[in-house]
Amino acid sequence: MIKNLRIRNFALIDDLEVTFDSGLNIIIGETGSGKSMIVDSLILLFGDRASSDFVRSGESKAVIEAEIDISGKAGISSLLENNEIEFIIEDTLILRREISAKGSSRNFVNDTPTTLNLLKAIGELLIDFHGQHDHQSLLKSENHIQIFDAINKKDTLIAQFAELKVQLSDKIDEYKSLTKKEHDLKSQRDNLLFKLDEIKQVDPQEDEDSNLETELVVLENAEQIIIQCNESYNLLFDSDTGAQSILSKVNKTLQNLSKFDSAFEQYANEIYSAEIISKESSAFLMDYIEKLEYNPEKIEHIRTRLYNIKGLCRKYGTLAEVLELRDKIIAELSESENFDFLTKDLLKQINSLRADLAKIGKQINQLRTSESKTFTSKLEEKLNQMGIANAEFQVVIKHREASNGDLLSIDLEKKSYKVFDNGYDELEFHISTNKGEKPTPLAEVASGGEVSRIMLALKSILAGNDLIPIMVFDEIDTGISGRIAQKVGLVMKELANYHQILAITHLPQIAAMGDNLVLVRKHENEERTFVETKLLTNDEKIHEIAKMLSGEELTEAAIESAKILINKTV
């Protein structure tokens, strides 16, 4: 539960501290006094989008901070542990959000800087906001199935259905991709075969173009190469003045000198190594001359071969890309031979998944159908408790037939139905609030006051199943008054047995139900407007409720009426 909320420099609020307790906390005050700012600050604290407009004029930043008792909320403890956030006070969560006048914000959990996403995750586990705008969400039939399922939990089955639907969708995408590929290949087959035949006729090998170009340079310059090789050979080996002969003589001289001084020995060895290298070079030159021949036919063959390879490269890219294209075409043509097998196998998998979906979808549908009777009975009882005596409520479950050939569907009773993430049901609330009238869609018949009570009834039924400990109601009593307001207040007080409730109201009948009453007041000095709150004592509670009944001029009758209202809640 929220124990303490402090708000600084937020809109009209200068510095405000509000203390809450368990049970039903009622926030009262005149219109425009700043009550909704308290709710707005909480919405921001739990991750809503921030804006510089929230910062009080002339201030650098707004600060919202809450101290929350999370005893028994293991999910929050695990969330903090996973984000390496420690407790400052055991079982106490301290949230803070700072919004700068420039529009940026900083977020803290237990004085540790953190992300806005973590604040949102904490909010999802801790608090449920319900305001006047939620009446509109209740009037939208697409929201009804989520409301119904939240009360009648079937999370495991729905999770299984959603997972299978994802698998089915993936398989259908794979099947569509394969059939498109098959179609594309069929339309391109002749072109692919032509390209493959063209490449195969040349039959190029890896790096063949560069190897042939090197060989061609040698053959085209064979005569010059032979002349220069002969000259080099003669310089190394031929005659008494050849390099080998000279090196041999120098080596012998140095060997003799080394007998007198060992310093000559190193250089004698070096000269010997040079002599060996010259002999090996001579042998290489003679071998190269013997193998090399000027062959015009071979030169012409290489030129023709290079021309053909370069012709392929001009059309398809480098030689490496030509070979890659060849291999790709071969692989695709080979795959095309297996299309029938692959598509049949995929269709088999798809139909198996559709059958599994149909089985689980049917189970979900049967549960919803059976639970709808208990649900409508409970809701009618709550509505009767809140003054809608002749309410007849219906949960209408429908199914949407799938279009022809839609694989993302299930087959039941010789029909194909469209599937959603939570099953194949579409659900809509129907109601009649007048005896003898047939129930019709909620949006068509319910007044604002009736919608408020229906939403509160739904929240009340949900209370036993709902693990969220804090609920905030911002004037959900819109459109009701008098005797009905008192009945609504009793339901809210009952709901407070399961949750900490923070509720804004203008109705004295509901205010009288509060375990704790917080008064919000606005006052002005010569320069600024300020907002302040006060946790009311019992006498102050009587006084303020009496003012809500009679206006500023208090009468004894109003005070007595306030006492009667309060005593009825005890």
Image (cartoon, grey):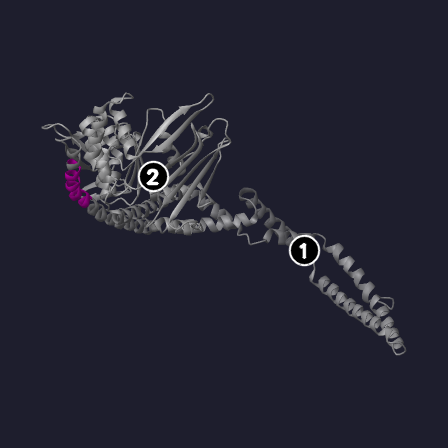
Q: Is residue 378 magenta?
A: yes
Q: Amino acid at mark 2?
A: Phe
Where's residue 368, x and y in %? 19, 43
Q: Earlier in the sequence, mark 2 or mark 1?
A: 2
Q: Residues within 10 Å of mark 1 (few under 14, many from 20)?
A: few
Name the residue tied to disc 2: 20
173 and 47: which one is in front? Answer: 47
Q: Tell me where residue 509 sits by quadrant.
A: top left
Q: Tell me where residue 401 sits by quadrant.
A: top left
Name the residue tied to disc 1: 295
Range of residues picked out in magenta: 365-380
> In the drawing, does residue 503 fall left or right of residue 103?
left
Q: Amino acid at mark 1?
A: Asn
221 and 362: which one is in front? Answer: 362
Where's residue 417, x and y in %? 22, 40
Q: Tell me where residue 150 sits by quadrant.
A: top left
Residue 157 appears in view: yes
> In the drawing, does residue 41 fall left or right of residue 368?
right
> In the drawing, does residue 12 fall left or right of residue 224?
left
Q: Quadrant of the C terminus?
A: top left
Where's residue 531, x and y in %? 40, 28
Q: Which numbered circle lies on residue 449? A: none
